[in-house]
Amino acid sequence: MAGIWLLKSEPSVFSWQDLKAAPQQTTCWEGVRNYQARNFIRDHMRVGDRVLFYHSNAKPPAIMGIAEVVTPPYPDHFAWNPESPYFDPKSTPGHARWFMVDIQYRRDFVPPITLPELRQVSALEGMLLLQRGCRLSVQPVTESEWQIILSLRSS
C-alpha cells in the first residue's frame, strides 16, 4: 500500500503555485536537513505515495492540495554544491548524507484546508501536524487522517 506524507514548505521559498508552474508540474523535494525527516524520505517514501502539500509560515498555514511521489529516493545533490543554501561539506557523491524525491501536482484543495480548520476536527487530534512542538517538514499521515482530510474537500 502506498504511503501518505505531509510535506511542509514556506510559500516564500517554494509554493504550491511554484509546483503547479514547474515543468510537468514536477519538482525535486530538496533541502531536507533534519535526520528524522531524511529517514522518512530515504527509508520509507516510494513511487506512488500520496502527498499533502502544506504551506507553513503562511497566514493562515494550510494544506494547499495533493501531490504524488514520482521517483524513488535519491541523493540530494544540492548538498554537494558550495553555492547552494543546502550545501553540506560532509555529504559527498560517494557518501550521500541527504536524500530527496520528486513530487508531482495532482489536485488543489479549494479552498485550502487551513490549520485552524484542521484543529477543529476532533478525529485529527492525534495527527503529527497538530502536535505541539512538531516542526518536521516531512511527516507521515495515517490512512484515516487522509480520508478525513479528503472528506473536508470532497470536490
Image (cartoon, rainbow, N blue to C red):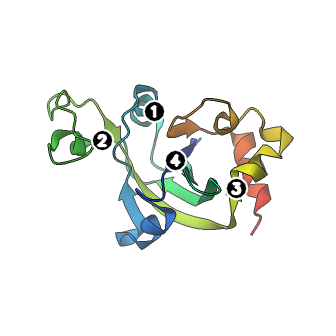
Tell me the SS state at disc 4: strand
Locate residue 100 relative to residue 140 in the image: left or right. left
Mark found first going from the N terminus, 2 or 3: 2
Q: Quadrant of residue 143?
A: top right
Relative height, residue 146 to residue 26 (above, below): above
Residue that numbered label 1 is attached to: 37
Extreme residue in the front direction: 59
How many other residues sit within 10 Å of disc 3, few (<14), some (14-19) or many (≥20)? some
| Amino acid marked by disc 2 | Tyr
Residue that numbered label 2 is attached to: 74
Residue that numbered label 4 is attached to: 8
**Do callouts 2 and 4 mark residues in contact (Cβ within 8 Å)?**
no
Q: Quadrant of residue 92?
A: top left
Residue that numbered label 3 is attached to: 114
Q: Could you tell me how far apart the alpha carbons at marks 2 and 4 are, in whole angstroms?
A: 19 Å
Q: Could you tell me how far apart the alpha carbons at marks 4 and 1 are, in whole angstroms?
A: 11 Å
Mark found first going from the N terminus, 4 or 1: 4
Q: Could you tell me how far apart the alpha carbons at marks 1 and 2 are, in whole angstroms?
A: 14 Å
**Do callouts 4 and 1 mark residues in contact (Cβ within 8 Å)?**
no
Q: Could you tell me how far apart the alpha carbons at marks 3 and 1 are, in whole angstroms?
A: 23 Å
Please state the horizontal and vertical placement of residue 80, each as a whole percent of the image: 17, 40
Q: Residue at x 34, y 47 (%)?
A: 30
Q: Which mark is residue 154?
A: none
Tell me the SS state at disc 1: helix
Relative height, residue 11 to residue 83 (above, below): below
Locate residue 80 relative to residue 107 in the image: left or right. left
| Amino acid marked by disc 3 | Thr
